Amino acid sequence: MSSGMARFAVRRLGQMVLVLFAVSVLVFLIFNVVPGGDPAVRMAGKIPTETQVEAIREEWGFDEPLYVQYATMMKNLFTGGTVSYFTGQDVTEEIWRGLPRTLSLAVGAALIWMAFAIGLGLFSALHAGRFSDRIVTVLALVGISMPVFWLGALMSYYLGNKAGIFPEGGYVEFSENPADWFWHLVMPWTALSVLFIGLYSRVLRSDIIETMGEDYVRTARAKGLSERRVLVKHVLRNSLIPIVTLWGLDFGAVIGGAAILTETVFGLQGVGEYAAEAIGQFDLPPIMAVTMFGAFFIVVFNTLVDIAYAALDPRIRLEGEVAR
Amino acid sequence: MSERAPLLGVRDLAVSFTTEEGPVRAVDGVDLELRAGEVLAVVGESGSGKSVTAMTLMGLTRGPNAAISGAATFEGTELLAAGDAELRAIRGNRMAMIFQDPMSSLDPVYRVADQIVEQIRAHRDLGKEEARERAIELLDAVGIPDAAKRADSYPHEFSGGMRQRAMIAMALSLEPSLLIADEPTTALDVTVQAQIIELLRDLNRERDLSILLITHDIGVVAEIADRVAVMYAGRIVEYGTLDEIFYEPQHPYTWGLLGSLTRIDRPRPRRLPQIPGMPPSLLAPPQGCHFRPRCAHAFDRCLEVPGLAPRLADAPGHLDRCWLEPERKRELREADSSSALEQPR
């Protein structure tokens, strides 16, 4: 078992390096072939002279062959010397500054959407076909269809600006004032969760209904267990397997970039908002760094999901693991 | 045979389910009596209502779409009227059930022993360790080799026969007086089937365990049953001791069923006889005797439902639902069985 685990880890690590390499090459190439991508021209100001542009090219190394530029960029990325072309700020520092904000948003939202999804999914599965189930279904579909930026803007305007219940935007460090931290995050959490609550509660509803028809649930009832125990220990335990894997993947994706809109609408200044700004300015170093950051989280969470899946379902073995 | 008190008595049990096409009357007035220590086999083809009967006794068909009427008394408790909590205290405890498909009847995410422990602790105030020891004893008793080690296996690590043994161990964990076995061998290989039947027979003899066996397999019935109830389209059409049913079948359906059995003590038919036609839809069952449309001997009176009653002077316990006179039945039965026999090759 442990040697299988080690083999699994090594293989996944290798895969991660490959994915990160491929992603970085792609981003780098796209940036260099897109028209108007030449950073030297834009860095030189509004009406640059040819000599100014040449000087910048030489200074920043833009005259080197692409593979040299790529190698330099990657080296800087991992040694911490990458700076933005336009602001001159250290990219790694900016990401570190944004990380707690993005993590606060993602962790809180993930907990909220999972808790609500389990509640709603269970409720509608137990009331399947009844009026209350239809209401929940409609709400879920509304939630799934609602664009985050629109919902976020509405909340920010009505609950923040007009009613003044919540702060319109911004972020307060947890260490500074936990209550304020929480209060600032309520709206972003909600806005980000709505889509996932809708999606997950639908998936869970059908998983639960399917599981309730399983023979082993009938066995559990025949054993004389209480209905509550049948539901929690046998129905939910089995229905949660697919949803937990989905959860891990989505959580990785939210940290790795899926929270861009929410962060921007509420001005959280997390990694996502930083990425959005960098893309707006066509600023390669932060784009590279943020992309690698996102890809890293997505790959890591993919691996964690596989491990969790094998732990939750004893029939599943990790690749490379030997049968007992 | 010494008469023993009935352990389970079922009177006029009817179960119907609401479906999109209309109500389906799956069980239509079933009477059964199981005496303590006996094996009662309910035989019928799929859709005859035999499994629904068994599951209704366990309370497993209760739901918004099911209408259940009649009476079922088990050890003095009226099962159909029992509240959920009362029923929960009985099932798994005094009355346990094993199912057709052992592959899917155990929860895939828990270890086998833990599933047995869960049942024990649902009914007895026992520590985890004690319950686990008991689970291992049970697994050993039903013939799981190396039970102490295999107890920690997951169901998918067991073969089909072992899973059914584990189900039986679980069912026996609280020493119930009644075991309901719903097609316990259908999903298993023939050799494993024989082992499971043997295990059930031993449990019946050694532990005095009463068994309600639901099956479509006449061969299984012959091996283990004391009494037999033949079920067709939601009704019991014949009820009697094993010998009565096998040697003096009174209902044309029963003798059709027995005629479709290969027997080594009789000349071999060229082709295995079968009952023509299909069982009726229970959405719109035929008027009168449900077997009438398939019966070669139906006559006017069969449009009326025959009651389940003794019709032979010398066998008051042998009941059937057929209007034909016993003498006439014998003639027709013999004619049927000889017409099914071609010249032996």
Image (spheres, coloured by chain):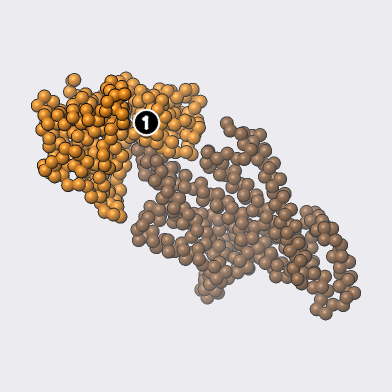
Chain colours: A brown, B orange
Query: Residue visible at 51% across and 67% down?
Result: A146
Query: Residue visible at 54% across and 68% down?
Result: A147
Q: Nearer the viewer, residue B98 or A281?
A: B98
In the image, taking residue A71 as reference, residue B164 lies left or right, namely left
Q: Horizontal and vertical percent for residue A257?
A: 64, 60
Query: Residue visible at 73% across and 63% down?
Result: A30
State which quarter of the image contains the C terminus of chain B: top left
The amino acid beneath tag 1 is Thr
Mark 1, residue position: B185
> Which chain hosts label 1?
B
Q: Which of B124 and A221 is in front in this view?
A: A221
Q: Nearer the viewer, residue B21 or A73?
A: B21
Q: Which of A282 and A262 is in front in this view?
A: A282
Residue A47 seen from this side: yes
Depicted B193 relative to depicted B108: above or below: above
Residue B222 seen from this side: no
Q: Quadrant of residue B40?
A: top left
State which quarter of the image contains the N terminus of chain B: top left
Q: Quadrant of residue A172?
A: bottom right
Near mark 1 (Cα within 10 A), the count class, few <14, some 14-19 or many ≥20, is many
Depicted B107 relative to depicted A27: above or below: above
Q: What element carries label 1?
A: loop
Query: Residue visible at 64% across and 38% down?
Result: A320
Q: Horizontal and vertical percent for residue A219?
A: 38, 38
In the image, taking residue A295 as reference, residue B233 lies left or right, namely left
